[in-house]
Each structure stands twice: as C-alpha cells, then as structure tokens.
Amino acid sequence: MLFIPAYAKLNLALSVLGRRPDGRHDLRSVVVRLDWHDLVGAEVGEGEVADKAPAIGVTVSGPAATEVPVEDNLVLRAARAVLPGRPAGAVRLYLEKRLPAAAGLGGGSADAAAVLRLLGGAGISTWDPEMLRLADTLGSDVPACLAGGSLLVGGAGGCLEPILHPPLDLTVAVAGRSGTAATFAALTPDDWRGPERPEALAVLLAQGRPVAAELLGSDLEAAACRAHPELAAGLHRLRDALPATAWHLTGSGGAVFALAAGRGEAEAVAARTRDLGFPARACRTIAA
C-alpha cells in the first residue's frame, strides 16, 4: 500500500467579495500549506471488477478518527469520483486522521486531494485541468489542496495562482468548533470586503517582505462567531489571556493562528496556549 501525507491548509487572509448565482460565494484568499498532516494510503487489488463500480473500503485510525463519518466521507467520495471509467479491482483506503475536524484547516479536503493523487493514475499532474475540475466537485477547498504549495485563490475556490515565498513560522490553536455551512449561512453583505487585502499580502509574501498584521485574518470571523458562540467565547478568552499575541481566524475557523519570529517563539506561544486548555502546536509553512 502506498501512503502520502495530506497537509493542512491555512488561510492567512480571506475576503468575501459577494454571492454567486449558484449560491456559492466569490472569495479572495491567500492559502498556505502547513507541516501538519493526515496520512492517506491506497491499494488497488489485482484483477478488474467487470460491469460495476469497484468495491471501496476505508480503514480510519489516529487521534481524530472518531470525527470521520464511516458511511460517507470525502475520502470515499473522492475515490468514487476518480475511479469510474478506470478498470480496477477492489480498492482499500487507509486514513490516519491527525488533523482536528471543524477547525478550518482543510483536513477532509486534503484527504480527498490525496486520494485523487493516489488513484488518478501514473504521471498525474496536480495542475491538470480535468483533475482540478473533478476536485472542485468534491468541495471548494479540494482544488487548492490538490495543487499544493502557497496560493492566491479566487472565485469559489477554483482559481489558483502560485505564490513562492520564504517559510513562515506560526502557532496554530483550536479556539472552538465551527461549521462552514453554518458560518456562511450567518454571513451578511456587511461582512464582505474587497480583494485588496489578500492581494496585497500575496505581493508582500512573494517579495519576501515582512507581513503586515492588518492584512491577516478572515472576513468570516464575525459570521463564524455569530453562528458558534463556543468559538466566540474561546477566541475572546484566548485574546484576553495572551494580549501580546495577534490571533487571526483561518477561513471559517475554529482554528486561529499567530505569526512568530521563529520556531522558538512559535513553540513558546503554543506552550502558553496549551496551558490555557486550548489544543495548540508550532507549525511552519511548506512548499508541498
């Protein structure tokens, strides 16, 4: 069985531009990949399954395994989406779930993207238009997770522009749980902002210049806090207890992040955050 990492994503900045006719929202976001990941494996049995879809099974383990639905999850959906029309025997999938659920870190989307890579065939390009289109049918974050690296993202999540930049150290903490659907349902036009903030951040990153704190964070924070009082309370307590640390929500939350001057500072902030009872860890952005 072949295994690959499914890296967490983090929205350094996210702006909502408006609502699309299809009900989705136009976004502008700077997305980075973290050195924190699930592990996804796949094995295709010998022999072809004639005249029917191949049988697909998944085994889930790891510290966050109980957060994954057994009957229907993004790993299974990705496998079903990529296999039709491709001769295959029975497929066995393995997911070691390490990333927290309902945290805005794209764990499910990263897992789905990993399955597309594993089952998409030899020589697959993660920037292949057909694969990106397939990824978009699975969820707005899946194309970015499939492409990998740091990206300036537009549209509903399918317009991707690579950003090359030096690695960033940061602390990531989970302030509370948050659901994407409930957050977007609570969103109002008053929460929308233009694309200037993420675009300015992308320029600074590409130039290797210091990142201005006012460019970070998510337009979804107010809606996420309205929809999830537990997240609002956790974020308030975290900011109140560590006032010298600038915490920003990633995407729809409930993970938050704070940039650090280096690994040591990120570790120190993570330790203080864990002392307050919040799950937290030091992370670094990666180019994968």
Image: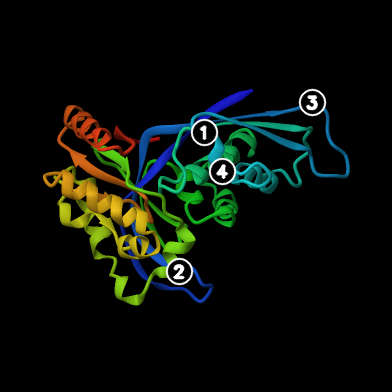
Q: Quadrant of residue 89?
A: top right
Task: Determine crowd level at label 2: few under 14, some 14-19, many 20+ residues with C-alpha closer than 10 A.
Answer: few
Give the label, 4 or 1, closer to the camera: 1
In terms of depth relative to the viewer, which is nearer, 215 or 241?
241
Q: Please give left or right for residue 116 compared with residue 251 in the image.
A: right
Q: Are marks 4 and 2 in contact (CB under 8 Å)?
A: no
> Which label sits on residue 46?
3
Distance (Cα) linking label 4 and label 1? 12 Å
Q: Earlier in the sequence, mark 4 or mark 3?
A: 3
Badge 1 amino acid: Lys
C-alpha distance separating marks 2 and 1: 28 Å
| SS for dot 3 | loop
Position in image of residue 135 (x %, y %)? 56, 51
Q: CA distance from mark 4 to mark 2?
A: 24 Å
In the image, 99 versus 52, the foreground residue is 99
Between the C-alphas of marks 3 and 1, the distance is 27 Å
Which one is closest to the eye, mark 2 or mark 3? 2
Which kind of residue does numbered mark 4 sit on?
Ala
The amino acid beneath tag 3 is Glu
Under mark 2, the amino acid is: Ala
Q: Which residue is labeled 2 in the image?
A: 185
Residue behind mark 4: 112
